[in-house]
Amino acid sequence: MHFFTGGCGDMLAFTKAGFLSLYAANHHSASAATARGNFPGLFVKEADLQSVDMRSVPPAQVLVASPICTEASPNSGRTAPRNPVELDENGRPKPGPDWPQTRITMWEPVRYAEVHRPMAYVGENVPAFGNSPLFKAWLHVWDALGYIPTLASVNAAHLKVEGMRPLPQSRDRLVWCFLRQDIGAANGLPDLRPTCDAICPTCGPVEGVQHWKKNPGFPVGEYGRRSRQYYYVCPNRRCGAPLEPITRGIGDVIDPMVRGDRFGDGYFKGKQRVTRTPYEQATRDRVAIGLERYRGKPFIVTLRNHCDASSLDDPIGTLSAQGGGHHYLASPTADLSVDECEYRPLTILEKARCQGFPDDHEFAGKEPDQRLQVGNAVPVNVAFWLAQRVMAVLPH
């Protein structure tokens, strides 16, 4: 059972792991069409789940649903509104900051579990979701329903997954499996301890294990960050040396046949594509840094605060929910001129590869719809790892 299907990254992964998908739901027309197109015969419900009576939804052994909860997380740059909505003279709300009610989606899996009692509920979100004020209250609700939570924090660029390579995108995720108590008592809980391939300077090639600087009993956080940060260490007890995960570079998914434009010509602003606008000085500076740093080799320019240029041998940063419009490929000319540099955004296909989608996976809708589905997708390798671990504790 799949709620909030989006680009179908989790459905693709769970199918690969041996699950049979029965039902998918999403309010977004293009996302619903993507599910129908890639999974013929699947029943797809196009609707806001808040309006769906869960008694009308069929039962399933596993619910896969990653709620949308971006507004109150640091990843979105917004916090909860503190002021009441102002009304005009007719009693209608005045225009103000956008605050979609997507936090409600975290309660839709609860409604489903209350009616159908699946063996497991599986999902993922940004790590900030786990540190939001409602998260622990949410866990208490699942406990009251008779489910045991298992949490893990993983990064798609590091995760060792049987049958899939790490992704060329550094993407921190909080993942979970809420297992029904009777299933857990009979078969144990899923092993959600992530590992990575690494080279220990003393022991050689090893599977690095996760080490938390503090509060290991609540493994919610991001790789290498200041708050609740974790890193990897050598698994040999006599060693325990800190390790750097072996990663995969973005160059693996770049299509060399796609050409860019001359940087000095600027870019088209607006849909009419009539007048070109020069790039801002901050963007020129990033390109100049890359030209100096990589001396004639193509590189990635990332248009985010505290980012500049990075090598094609490294993963890119997280693709945003808006479709990853922060990453550009710069290809220098022989004279290393900023203006003569060939410059283009990553294509939707390249971004989809960064999320682990195969090239034959088709995204429905117009280009903005496709960007949204790719940017919002569950990384396929993360979902596949999660599906394998959950499958191992379910009765067969």
Image: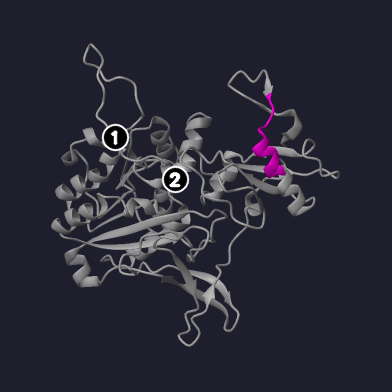
Nearest the viewer among 319 and 85 is 85
Nearest the viewer among 318 and 207 is 318
Element assignment for label 2 = loop
On screen, residue 40 versus residue 54, left or right, reads right
Q: Position of residue 17 (x, y in %)?
A: 40, 59
Residue 337, by quadrant, is: top right
The residue lying at 24 percent from left, 19 percent from top is: 87
Circles 2, 1 touching at the beta carbon (< 8 Å) = no
The chief SS type of the magenta part is helix
2 or 1: mark nearer the eye: 1
Magenta span of residues: 277-287
The residue lying at 42 percent from left, 42 percent from top is: 76
The residue lying at 67 percent from left, 32 percent from top is: 279
- The amino acid beneath tag 1 is Gln
Q: Name the residue under label 2.
A: 377
Q: Where is residue 111 in the image (x, y as percent from the top left)?
A: 18, 45
Q: Mark 1 points at which residue?
A: 101
